[in-house]
């Protein structure tokens, strides 16, 4: 706290520092009259992939793992069965045919039932309501039976493990959906759901009951949707103000094999009949192996579009180009490569556009969207085809798919990829091919260390302004050997973003990645938002992104930065490769001028900020100053201690055309002038 007060004081003192002349300071000059390139509303966004338990066990609020008994090879993964439990495969849902048969043990004190472990436990909040639903039927000519459902704490030393309970009367031999609501009397991070087969009097069941699709949701989901998102996690997305939302991956779009690729058509329609898929992140790293990582697709393309709309972001789906992951399949000989062979992939693109935008009166995919509750179009404008693919196998397929999609939907902007690296031959060849294929944007990926970022602060200054625009679709900074969300890396992300911002004429989208991570289930770090079963943590990188997203502005203002002594430099190097980086924008809707200044050096830097080109009466009179102090290098926000690094706001008068300030070490300072 003391530290933050000191920072605020340094910034607030700014205008009073008369002792030093401007040339002893780093001089930032903003031409406030000459608004430059428009900043796209899509400029800063988010990239969602189901990695690190981002969907099931994360954003998707379902609390039951393997709810339809379809995990393989063990259909009871996530469940602990007791008594007589049999997995059967002729259930009511064609594409998820497995269910369990619970049969009597023939004894009052011998029990049959099931217990679900959730995703690293089931997180429950005190006094919150949870809706449990399941499909059931009486089997073997049984008469009415009960299913007693309980929240249990298996680790308690208390007399009772169960702390909430409800009974479901199973009354017919036909499959029927049953629903009960349980209130949790306590907050617990790792509860389990237990189900007993019972008689009416609570004794062990004497009949047989079939059970399918056991589902548990908090009633308080994001926007109250029944098949909803976890409120705190979705809220964190909403609070960012993202301009674009890329989904559903990533590598999972490609699949470890082509059969395992993400197929959006499997993710729409009633959730009970969405066929599950192995998650590619189950097997990608043997050193972080999660054999029970599957995709239920409960969070599917309808839900992605709906969420994009609710958080105010442009949806940007990525579809497969007819190839599995090139890293894992260097032989693409068996992948389709002709127009005929790629028909399904072409149709997937065209049908998706119809699903999102079509008229339900004339199009079956649009009708499905309407049936799912959204008759209005979602207003899809962008479609990416392929992720991290390279060279001829990719270019040839895209050369078949893209024109076919364009013929059907010329209004959609198509995005191609430049491969997994941001500077090698594949990358350069990728860009050349994308120019030739007239992609609207090219997706670049760079998960790189601090040194790479230090040397890439001018990356886009000399980009070719003709042809496709840049979509920095996956990027993040880590320190060498330190791949977690430490504040010391986030400051370089903030500095790098001045480079995106001043090149807004060529950079139209940028999305940090990955987005989410479950504290008990991660495969990849760093990540923007972390959670356990109860809490969410917004990382220092999150706050960097948020400050840019919330203060995006509408137009770039030309900004120069001069070293002490007056020597101009696009990005001054004050100490080693560190320095002070700045960019500025105006927001024509609010009239604000927003200046971002980032000091990546290990000591405070004296600066001056001059506004040129403004008449005296147009000069701002005050500044809101938001600072993000990243000087505690290893500081990390975690669900157990979420706000170690967080923005602080102060105010200061803006008294002249040139104002002096001091930016503390490793600090991002954002000035909003009005
Ligand atoms: O974000 C994690 C992975 O990184 C993505 O799936 C892939 O596109 C990239 O290699």
Image (cartoon, rainbow, N blue to C red):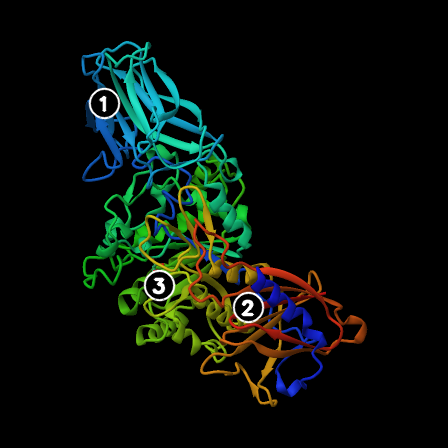
Instruction: Tell me the quadrant of the picture where the C terminus can be found.
Output: bottom right
Return the mark for residue 624: none
Please tell me in which quadrant of the rendered image residue 92 appears: top left
Disc 3 crowd rating (10 Å Cα; few below 14, some 14-19, many 20+) is: some
Q: Is mark 1 within 8 Å of ligand 1?
A: no
Disc 2 crowd rating (10 Å Cα; few below 14, some 14-19, many 20+) is: many
Tell me the residue that label 2 is attached to. Answer: 668
Q: Residue at x 46, y 70 (%)?
A: 492
Dot 3: element: loop
Tell me the residue that label 1 is attached to. Answer: 101
| Quadrant of picture, ligand 1 | bottom left
Is 615 or 230 nearer to us in this picture?
A: 230
The tag earlier along the polypeptide, 3 or 1, is 1
Q: Residue at x 61, y 89 (%)?
A: 566
Dot 1: element: strand
Disc 1 crowd rating (10 Å Cα; few below 14, some 14-19, many 20+) is: many
Q: Is mark 3 within 8 Å of ligand 1?
A: no
The tag earlier along the polypeptide, 3 or 2, is 3
Q: CA distance from mark 1 to mark 2?
A: 59 Å
Is residue 449 among the parts visible in the rendering? yes
Q: Position of residue 667 (x, y in %)?
A: 54, 69
Quick check: marks 3 and 1 in contact, CB under 8 Å?
Answer: no
Task: Kindly report which numbered mark, 1 or 2, lies closer to the viewer in this rendering.
Answer: 2
Q: Is residue 472 above or below residue 22?
A: above
Is 102 or 628 nearer to us in this picture?
A: 628
Tell me the residue that label 3 is attached to. Answer: 483
Quick check: marks 1 and 2 in contact, CB under 8 Å?
Answer: no
């Amino acid at each position: 706290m003391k530290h933050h007060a000191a920072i605020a004081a340094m910034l607030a003192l700014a205008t009073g520092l008369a002792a030093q002349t401007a040339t002893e300071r780093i001089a930032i000059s903003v031409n406030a009259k000459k608004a430059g390139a428009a900043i796209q509303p899509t400029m800063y966004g988010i990239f969602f992939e189901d990695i690190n338990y981002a969907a099931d066990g994360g954003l998707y609020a379902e609390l039951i793992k393997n709810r339809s008994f379809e995990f393989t090879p063990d259909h009871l993964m996530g469940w602990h069965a007791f008594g007589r439990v049999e997995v059967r495969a002729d259930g009511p849902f064609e594409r998820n045919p497995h269910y369990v048969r619970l049969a009597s043990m023939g004894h009052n004190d011998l029990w049959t039932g099931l217990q679900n472990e959730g995703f690293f436990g089931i997180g429950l909040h005190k006094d919150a309501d949870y809706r449990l639903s399941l499909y059931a039927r009486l089997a073997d000519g049984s008469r009415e039976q009960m299913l007693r459902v309980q929240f249990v704490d298996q680790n308690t030393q208390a007399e009772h493990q169960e702390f909430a309970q409800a009974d479901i009367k199973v009354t017919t031999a036909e499959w029927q959906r049953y629903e009960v609501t349980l209130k949790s009397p306590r907050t617990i991070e790792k509860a389990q759901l237990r189900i007993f087969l019972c008689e009416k009097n609570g004794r062990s069941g004497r009949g047989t009951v079939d059970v399918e699709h056991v589902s548990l949701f908090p009633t308080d989901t994001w926007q109250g949707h029944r098949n909803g998102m976890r409120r705190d996690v979705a809220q964190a997305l909403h609070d960012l103000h993202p301009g674009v939302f890329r989904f559903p991956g990533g590598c999972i779009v490609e699949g470890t094999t082509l059969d395992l690729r993400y197929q959006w058509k499997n993710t729409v329609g009633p959730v009970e009949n969405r066929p599950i898929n192995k998650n590619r992140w189950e097997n990608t790293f043997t050193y972080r192996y999660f054999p029970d990582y599957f995709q239920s697709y409960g969070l599917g393309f309808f839900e992605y579009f709906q969420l994009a709309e609710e958080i105010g972001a442009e949806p940007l789906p990525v579809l497969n180009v007819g190839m599995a992951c090139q890293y894992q399949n260097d032989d693409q000989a068996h992948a389709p490569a002709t127009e005929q062979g790629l028909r399904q992939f072409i149709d997937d693109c065209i049908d998706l556009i119809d699903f999102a935008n079509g008229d339900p009166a004339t199009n079956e995919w649009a009708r499905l969207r309407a049936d799912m509750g959204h008759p209005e179009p979602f207003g899809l404008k962008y479609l990416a085809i392929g992720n991290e693919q390279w060279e001829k196998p990719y270019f040839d397929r895209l050369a078949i798919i893209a024109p076919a999609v364009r013929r059907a939907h010329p209004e959609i902007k198509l995005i191609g990829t430049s491969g997994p690296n941001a500077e090698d031959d594949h990358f350069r060849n990728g860009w050349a091919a994308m120019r030739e294929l007239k992609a609207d944007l090219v997706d670049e990926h760079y998960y790189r260390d601090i040194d790479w970022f230090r040397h890439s602060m001018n990356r886009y200054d000399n980009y070719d302004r003709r042809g496709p625009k840049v979509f920095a679709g996956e990027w993040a900074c880590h320190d060498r050997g330190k791949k977690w969300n430490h504040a010391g890396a986030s400051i370089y992300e903030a500095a790098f973003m001045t480079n995106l911002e001043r090149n807004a004429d060529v950079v139209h989208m940028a999305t940090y990645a990955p987005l989410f991570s479950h504290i008990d289930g991660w495969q990849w770090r760093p990540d923007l938002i972390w959670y356990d079963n109860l809490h969410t943590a917004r990382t220092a990188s999150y706050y960097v992104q948020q400050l840019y997203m919330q203060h995006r502005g509408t137009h770039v203002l030309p900004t120069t930065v001069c070293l002490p002594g007056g020597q101009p430099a696009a990005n001054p190097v004050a100490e080693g490769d560190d320095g002070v980086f700045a960019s500025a924008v105006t927001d024509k809707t609010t009239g604000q001028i927003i200046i971002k200044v980032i000091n990546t050096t290990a000591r405070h830097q004296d600066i001056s900020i001059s506004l040129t080109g403004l008449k005296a009466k147009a000069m701002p009179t005050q500044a809101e100053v938001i600072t993000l102090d990243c000087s505690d290098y290893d500081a990390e926000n975690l669900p157990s201690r979420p706000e170690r690094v967080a923005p602080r706001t102060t105010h200061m008068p803006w008294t002249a055309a040139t104002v002096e300030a001091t930016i503390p070490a490793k600090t991002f300072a954002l000035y909003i002038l009005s």
